[in-house]
Amino acid sequence: QKEVEQDPGPLSVPEGAIVSLNCTYSNSAFQYFMWYRQYSRKGPELLMYTYSSGNKEDGRFTAQVDKSSKYISLFIRDSQPSDSATYLCAMSHSIQGAQKLVFGQGTRLTINP
Amino acid sequence: DAGITQSPRYKITETGRQVTLMCHQTWSHSYMFWYRQDLGHGLRLIYYSAAADITDKGEVPDGYVVSRSKTENFPLTLESATRSQTSVYFCASSEISIRGTDTQYFGPGTRLTVL
């Protein structure tokens, strides 16, 4: 069983829809939870960062962490064609001072105009 | 240019050959990382480095060698390339923060094909 599970999709929705992306994990030691966005043929870039449980909002994006259920979500409101990308969840705990990230498989998202 | 760069961007090689992928960052970040990205596996950590001359294995280190003689450079060498090492390779860097961890910034990737 993988430490982090993410539905690879692909997911296709119309412009303006609310998008929900999810990951589950098995390692209770994870403390930091991130969402990266990766455009085609590019490197991942950090989108949202959350420490421990709770919600975090940044514009149209909301990240949720439920440590009791080992479940994290990313919501995108009023989705735009420019949001079309692969979204990767990532989690970490510090080991000897290094932040070692464990990634989900990534969900490929397409927003249709 | 400021940031993190990788070279080459594309590489085709043959089984058994030695290949070196380069990574350079201009931020003087302490930590550098190498990942590979494959369908069905997402990004997996190969090696990481906490500082010059300090390196450690990640999840999938077999068949790879790293070195870090200078803070800004972190080359990844495939000593004898195999077809299973066909992948997209990403380098990343980060700095130490008060909370003990910080954002990792990724390079544009190197697409390696081993024939």
Image: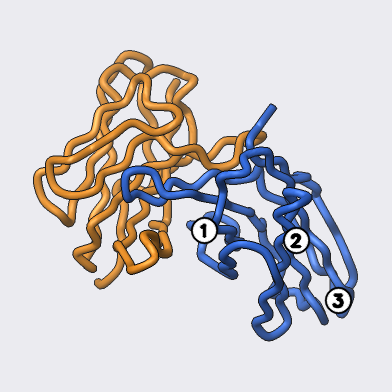
Chain colours: A blue, B orange
Please give left or right for residue A72 compared with residue A91 in the image: right
* Amino acid type assigned to the residue bearing label 2 in the image: Ser
Q: Quadrant of the C terminus of chain A?
A: bottom right
* Amino acid type assigned to the residue bearing label 1 in the image: Pro
Residue shown at 53% from the left, 54% from the top: A41
The reply to the same-chain question for discs 1 and 2 is yes
Q: Residue B14 in the image: x percent, y percent?
A: 36, 20
Please identify the residue farthest to the front as the structure is shown: A68
Nearer to us of marks 3 and 2 is: 2
Disc 3 designates what residue? A15
Above or below, comparing residue A48 to residue A32 in the picture:
below
Disc 2 designates what residue? A73
Residue B19 figure quarter: top left
Please identify the residue farthest to the left as the structure is shown: B69
The reply to the same-chain question for discs 3 and 1 is yes
Q: Residue A40 in the image: x percent, y percent?
A: 59, 57
Say which element carries label 1.
loop
Q: What is the distance, in whole Å, between disc 1 and disc 2 at their CAs?
A: 18 Å
Residue sitting nearer the eye, B52 or B35? B52
Residue B2 figure quarter: bottom left
Decide: marks 3, 2 in contact (CB < 8 A)? no
Residue shown at 63% from the left, 54% from the top: A88
Q: Earlier in the sequence, mark 3 or mark 2?
A: 3
Say which element carries label 2.
strand
Write down the chain letter for disc 1: A
